[in-house]
Amino acid sequence: MTNTDVVIVGAGPTGLFCAHQLGIIGLKCEIVDNLDKIGGQCIELYPDKPIYDIPAIPECTGEELTNSLIEQIKPFNFNFHLNERVQEIKNENNKWILKTSKGKEFNTPNIVIAGGVGSFEPRKFPTKSCEKFEGKSVLYSIKNKSIFKNKTVVIFGGGDSALDWAIELSKDSKVTLIHRRDEFRGAQGSVEKVKELQKNNKLEVITKYSIKDVKGNEKLESVEIKDESGQSKTLKTDYVLGFFGLIMQLGPILNWGLNLDKKHIPVNTENFETNQKGIFAIGDICTYPGKLKLILSGFHEGALAARGCFKYARPDENLRFEFSTTSKSVHERLGIKK
Amino acid sequence: MAKITYIENNGKNHTVEVSNGLSVMEGAIQNNIPGIDADCGGGMACATCHVYVKEKWFNKLPPKNEGEDDMIDQAYEPSSNSRLSCQIQVSDNLNGLEVYLPEKQI
């Protein structure tokens, strides 16, 4: 069990800057994120797309912004817990006990939810019959590619993941790549490689088809595909893989006793606390009159939520307002030597 | 201003007036029409404002933006008349537009 002042759920820009603000006012925090890397949507959705509306930064990419935010909180040495999702929380003696998907436990007076629009999960096939085989022969990610050796694999999708795996698995497996239209959105090099493999009969490509059904009793036997007009055909296969990008799901947060407005958590705009004492929500996941889903709004929300956390973390102290330019204690926390 | 009809998957119709300059997605959100999630808020980054445009309207709309089809690839059950409603800007020309909402967005 780790004791800390604050647990931040979500390592996107909003969560990172909130951590900075906590460090500035002398609080400790632990940061948990379901993704395997820091940066949230900035890294997962648009790492190389430029952002033009960060104050005082005319242009930067999602990756550059993330790196700068990481650099900015370095002096505080906060711990990141990546690839972990906060699974459950419970209240004991005015403290929150959190348990992650990897079994780690935290004891804290404050939780800051900076979860974007939830955790990223692979988008699944619309076909109900796929559920029966999910995780066994219908897969949305690959952990161990050796299971496909000398097997038949049908891959759906038109982006980089679909193309990369089609190319990789075609070395040792019989692969069919299926996409709903003729154009692929993956990297040009991969698209060309797929065409070359197709020409040499190393890989079959079927376009303008999508999944209709999967069949099999104990074991997956075949996949049925359909075109726009409803014409269908059946392919025998051992595995079906789907790569349709990621969707965002609120997941376990739904069970934390928070008020919800559609997929958002209502907060007050004084300190961004939710209806639960000691649980704050900032960034895209929170809502209030006038809410803007901008990174800069998330920064503001994080700064105020950090102050909100102070009163529960240090109930006997008063927080004094200080500027980072002149405050000695802030300089000490930042490790600035003069 | 354009009158836009959103038809839910269960057949329920919602006809609302949407101001010029808003997107078809915003028209749905502002009028609390169920069936459009718009998780990313209009950034063409999520495919949860997916709609099917009534055939006779499909070709009258301004063409798809670069990247829109890439995102539609990831939508729930896309079809040849699929659009992302956040990318359709409302104008007088769209008066009478009808869009069908998919069974679900994710």
Image (spheres, grey):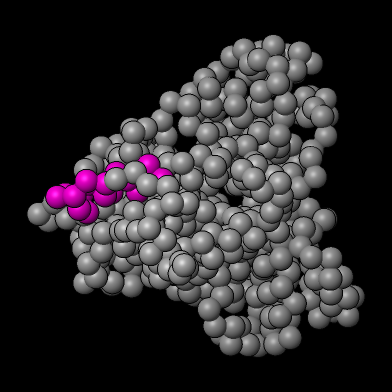
Whether residue A161 is visible to the viewer of this picture, yes or no, is: yes
Residue furthest to the left: A93
Is A159 placed left or right of A97 in the picture? right
Location of residue A108 in the rendering, given as x and y in whole percent from the top left corner:
22, 59
Location of residue A239 in the rendering, given as x and y in whole percent from the top left corner:
59, 74
| Rendering quarter of residue A213 | bottom right
Residue shown at the point (59%, 14%) measured from the top left: B16
The verdict on residue B72 being magenta is: no
Q: In this view, does A248 lie above or below A101?
A: above
The part of the chain drawn in magenta is A302-319
The quarter of the image holding the N terminus of chain A is bottom left
Location of residue A180 in the rendering, given as x and y in whole percent from the top left corner:
74, 54
Residue shown at the point (57%, 37%) measured from the top left: B41
Q: In this view, does B48 lie above or below A186?
A: above
Whether residue A285 is visible to the viewer of this picture, yes or no, is: no
Helix, strand or loop for the magenta stretch, by majority: helix
Between A57 and A267, the one lying in front of the other is A57
Is A324 placed left or right of A47 in the picture? left
Location of residue A99 in the rendering, given as x and y in whole percent from the top left corner:
26, 65
Is A28 placed left or right of A194 in the picture? left
Is A44 placed left or right of B88 in the picture? left
Q: Is residue A152 above or below residue B89?
A: below
Total marks placed: 0
Residue shown at the point (75%, 17%) measured from the top left: B91
| Rendering quarter of residue A183 | bottom right
